[in-house]
Amino acid sequence: MAQNCEWTLNVDGSCKSLINKAGIGRILQNRRGEWKGGFTDNASSNCATSVEVMAIARGIEWAWEKGVKELQVQTDASEVIKWMADYTSLRAPNRDIIDEIKHNWQRKFTRLEFKNIFREQNFATDRLATIGTFPEANWIDHEDPPPEMDDIIADDMMGATRVRRVHMS
């Protein structure tokens, strides 16, 4: 959870290249790690970093609409975090989205920070992003965590991580 901000927004994108689908997930939590909302959505791009950029932009707008003014955005997309700091070589369409975040959204928020986290720390949001790859998941607002995610949310609140399986050839 964010130490400097009242709210944390975890975002993730998921690309399923075999079925040509992409989804995004976001979870908004307070400083104590309590769930305050989440949502899943389809994404049009099949490029992982573009989906991550879209997830951040849509998540920031969604948090603003919920009245959040102080926000730390956490993502496991380290390349996108680097772009937020220095995007001089970045090209459209990602550059246009990041321009919108840097020049418009950062002025609106009292505090808007970006933090790179490990994939293992982003398991709950990854699960929502995977749900977002299904066609029927086009914009689902989750007031409460989906029931199958109760254990995952509890682990996240305690700061537990999940073991990441790596396939060796």
Image (tube, rainbow, N blue to C red):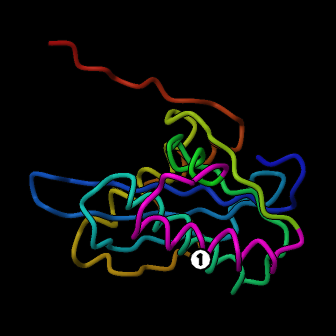
Q: How many marks?
A: 1
Dot 1 falls on a residue whose secondary structure is loop
Residue drawn at x 67%, y 57% is 73
The amino acid type, in three-letter code, at marker 1 is Glu
User: Left or right: where does residue 110 sit relative to residue 80?
Assistant: right
Q: Which of 34/97 is in front?
A: 97
Residue drawn at x 50%, y 43% is 79
Residue at the disc numbered 1: 143
Give the residue at the far bottom of this rendering: 65
| Residue stretch rendered in magenta on the structure | 85-110
Callout 1 environment at 10 Å: few (<14), some (14 to 19), or many (20+)? few
Q: Which of 77/97 is in front?
A: 97
User: Left or right: where does residue 119 sit relative to residue 3?
Assistant: left
Give the residue at the far front of this rendering: 88
Residue 35 part of the magenta-drawn span: no
Q: Which of 13/101 is in front?
A: 101
Give the residue at the far left of this rendering: 18
User: Left or right: where does residue 130 sit relative to residue 58?
Assistant: left
Q: Where is residue 112 drawn, in percent x and y?
A: 78, 63
Quadrant for the C terminus in the image? top left
Q: Where is residue 86 drawn, in percent x and y?
A: 63, 49
Residue 148 picture quarter: bottom left
Q: Where is residue 36 drawn, in percent x and y?
A: 70, 69
Residue drawn at x 79%, y 83% is 67
